[in-house]
Image: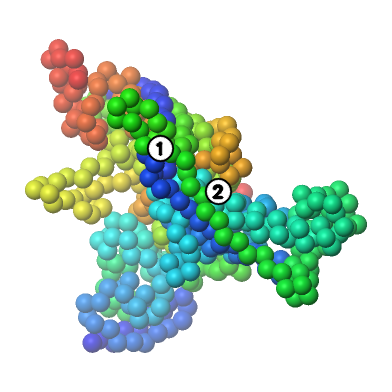
Amino acid sequence: MVELELTVNEKTYKLEIEPDERLIDVLRRRLGFTGTKEGCGEGECGACTVILDGRTVNSCLVLGVQAHGRKIITIEGVGDRRRPHPVQRAFVEEGAVQCGYCTPGMVLSAKALLDKNSDPSPQEIGVAMSGNLCRCTGYDKILRAVQRAAREVSGK
Amino acid sequence: MKKRGTGLSCTWYGTGYGNGFPDVSSAFVEIHDDGTATVLTGAVDVGQGSSTVFAQIMAEELGLNPEDILVCSGDTDVTPDSGTTAATRQTYNTGNAVLKAVRQAKLRLQEFAARKFSCPSPEGIEFKEGMIGVRGDPSRSMPLSELVWEARLLHGERFISAASFTAQTTPVSLENGQGAPYWPYAFGCQAAEVEVDTETGTVRVLKIVAAHDLGRAVNLTQAEGQIAGGVAQGVGYALLEEVELTEGRIKNPAFAKYLIPTALDVPEIESMIVEEPEDTGPYGAKGLGEPAMLPTVAAIINAIDAAVGVRITALPATPEKILAALAEKERGGSGD
Ligand code: FES
Ligand code: FES
């Protein structure tokens, strides 16, 4: 076991983990952030997306120990039913959620994009979201939702 | 060189299990004294939106908001069997069971209300915006919650019901081809515009227009979502997705080797909802799920043909197959 100290959604945790434990397992099993989903476990689907020091990563490909001393945002830290993030509100308004399995990762990818670039072009949105697979929606309403959120965030 | 072409395709699709196989859905309903209602069905919502559809049906019948309905689905401890979420059948089949069940509980409530409001027939009782009362006479109405409370606690009435619905199909006679193997049928038509790169063989789908007859859209947003989802799966089916087998084993059982469309692969999608009510469906509705992906494939293959004059006869239409067909055509073959 090794010691790990990391900040998740602005709260610092100290715990002991296995040296080969994946970040997704630290988040889901040890800390209970089950909003992070596992789709493929091999870095292809983006369901496990979290924001690590401002950048999106696939938490199934990151070792827990790599997150030592760093800041993570999971879907639980983005917003909730009472105070949804503009991206979450736009997803609801556009009807961009079907089975919902891809949704946490989609929302985090969109948030990470808008945090850096509040006025992205449709092409930039497509590229930013292309690491997250969705089998239900055909992406149409997801892309519309990100555009809607961008309009809200940028005030346009 | 990049060449563009358009293609068209039509589909008709028999929904439900078909061929006389027992296609049954069931629902339990209770109307509560706090202005809410519960429906239990075995139908599993895997993202197609059946739970929302059932909440809407309940709300429509009882004059409540969909948020006032608790849908409990797919819990084998407590829900009655409603068959699989497959065969494009849940909105139609389980939707019918929910409608039948809620109307039974509703009728008992109407009978109670008719007595209370001295209305000659239960049909004269209407449900509107959380109120129940005599049609056309707002002075004789009260909140649904209060009436149900009164009926339950002062008169011992209960507004509970159970109902099943069975889709009507028959096996087909192998002798003469007669029978009604499916009911209802869904219809659709799609047009695709593609761009084929004759140097690399790659195909980019630029736009899909998808028109689908779903009887009646219970939820327009979800119907559009199902169409877009179907189109994206159709794009994958046409151009990318292939289960490769060796000796019965799947060689590509992972997303790294089995590619599905990403946000960058889906075209602009324009959906057109055609509402031709289906007499046997809930409010005229019928299924949309699977039919949304089927015509995409043929429309894309036809569009490739229109663009570069080659007929692809094995899916997916990979760059290798398209380049081989183009080379064949060059050598004077038919391109088939
Ligand atoms: S679970 Fe991590 S990318 Fe699919
Ligand atoms: S909503 Fe089902 S995978 Fe995206």
Question: Height in image: A55 above or below B269?
Answer: below
Subunit of label 2: B
State the residue at coordinates (27%, 73%): A22
**In the rendered structure, which amino acid carries the disc numbered 1?**
Thr
Mark on residue B96?
A: 2
Please tell me whether mark 2 or mark 1 is closer to you in this view: 1
Residue B40 screen position, x and y as percent: 53, 63
**Whole-Å distance between the Cαs marked 2 and 1?**
19 Å
Q: In the image, what residue occupies the spot 70% across and 56% down?
A: B107
Which label is found at residue B170?
1
Single out the residue that lies furthest toward the top: B332
Q: Give the SS element for disc 1.
A: loop
- Left or right: A131 with respect to A118? left
The local secondary structure at tag 2 comes to helix
At label 1, counting other C-alpha atoms closer than 10 Å, the crowd grade (few under 14, some 14-19, many 20 or more) is: some
> Of the residues shown, which amino acid type is indicated by label 2?
Asn
